[in-house]
Image (cartoon, rainbow, N blue to C red):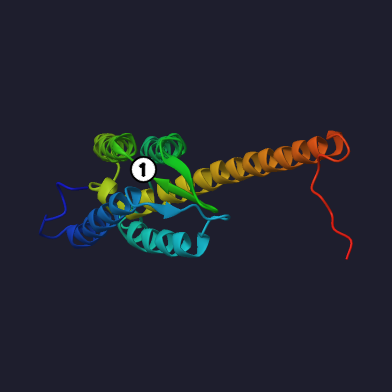
Amino acid sequence: MLGTAFAAGGNGLGQLDVGAIFGVLFFGYLLYRQVQARPVPREPRLQQQGLFLIVGLMLAVPLLSGHGKLSGAALGILLASFVVGATLAVARAHTVKLWWDGQRLMRKGGALSISLWLVSVALHIGAGVLNHVVGGPAGAESATAMLYLAVASTVQQVALVQRGKRRRIRARAARQEREAQAARAAQAAPEGLGPSTVDG
């Protein structure tokens, strides 16, 4: 993906350049967002992710369809790459730090989150090279870069939102337990030791 971003010439390389450049820009955007402290949404924001997925499809389909039907091996390698990317996205979601800032649940990725992103991209590049070896279209890793990153970021967001939901459920249960304990303590207090009342 990175190595072919500045390729030039014919044989479909123009489309490859666009896919690689969009992939590089989108990857930089994802890494920047990964290390920013932001609230954890209560639900996945699929509208934005859907836009990224559509752009990824628009960049991937022309190049792949322009090289004829993919062989079973080439298609299998690409699909395996996406499955591995999604699996790493779930793992990456569990490396993101969650904490409470008042009533807001916050998130921020760290060095391990970035490392898993780099591993994910490296594996996708390797899958693209292997795809070409078995007769698939050259530069498939660049053509599918945007789509691959969009799928990975969507899966990560869904997994992170699920973590946030579990954290909120535990926090709510803990708060309810504290309130119940306080109520039981008030009921068990000896008469006359509770809050005084004044008849006016």
- In the rendering, at what x and y percent does residue 54 appear? 43, 63
Q: Amino acid at mark 1?
A: Gly
Kindly identify the residue that appears in the image at 41 percent across and 49 percent down. Answer: 153
Q: Is residue 67 visible?
A: no
Q: Quadrant of the C terminus?
A: bottom right
Residue 61: image location, x then y, percent: 37, 58
- 63 or 182, nearer to the observer: 182
153 is higher (above) or lower (below) than 56: above
The residue that disc 1 covers is: 109
Instruction: Please state which of residues 182 and 109 is positioned toward the viewer in this rendering.
Output: 182
Camera sees residue 165? yes
Residue in the image at 44% along x and 34% along y:
91
- Residue 46 versus residue 102: which sits nearer the camera? 102
Q: Is residue 168 left or right of residue 16?
A: right
Q: Secondary structure at mark 1?
A: loop
The reply, left or right, for residue 47 in relation to residue 190 is left
Q: Residue at x 22, y 57 (%)?
A: 16
